[in-house]
Amino acid sequence: MQQTLVVSRSCLDAIGAHMHKWQTCTACPISSPRKTFFRGMIPCDVLIIGGGPLMGDEDIGKPMAGDNGAIIDELIDETIAEFTLHTSTGLPHRKLKTCIVNSVLCRGPAAPDKEAIRACSSRLAEFVSISKPKLLISCGKEAESAIISLLAYLSVYPHNISIRAPGYIARLSGDDRELEMSRAKLQINAALQNIFGRKD
């Protein structure tokens, strides 16, 4: 499920301004060309946050689109995509909308450090404000740190959970990998049921 980008008409101006504003950011030492702003739907119900872009992501121009993306897409397909949002009386039920973004936009030589995450936190907070998720899912320690940094910027803080980094899961094999995938799916399903109600 390599998600394409779908932005509702009401968010087009805000997203365009967001991308223009952060395209030339030099707030941290990395400050490399950024090609992987996000993928998925805006606004969204669930926002998945990774660490930083990888080489494969930049080739495709989407965050978590390589091997890590395969892990994330499987988690989406087998949890979030299975849910239906039960709307108010008279309105049709709909599937949950998902978006994927990284804690840090620029690709560095290693995983994002605290300085890069801190420098990019106002950008991430702005993206959260535009996309309006009800659930944040952080993938790995860097993303978990980025979610904590949002407390300084957001007046309304969405529900959030943390799962293992997809890169960690991708390096596992056999039963170990299956166990981590099952654990992540259980975490996501529990959060979805708590926030959005029953599964169809």
Image (cartoon, grey):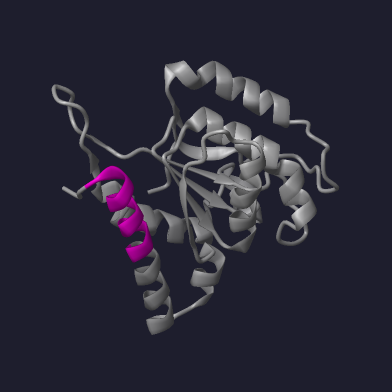
Task: Report whether residue 186 is seen.
Answer: yes
Residue 26 pos. (x, y %): 83, 37
194 in magenta: yes
Question: Depth check: 88 or 26 in front?
Answer: 88
172 displayed left or right of 23: left
Residue 80 pos. (x, y %): 32, 49
At x 56%, y 66%, the residue is 167
The number of numbered discs placed on residues in the rendered structure image is 0
The quarter of the displayed image where residue 186 is located: bottom left
Q: Which residues are magenta?
A: 186-197
The quarter of the displayed image where residue 86 is located: top left
At x 64%, y 58%, the residue is 142
Question: Depth check: 42 or 70 in front?
Answer: 42
168 in magenta: no
At x 53%, y 58%, the residue is 139
The outermost residue toward the right is: 29
Residue 133 pos. (x, y %): 44, 37
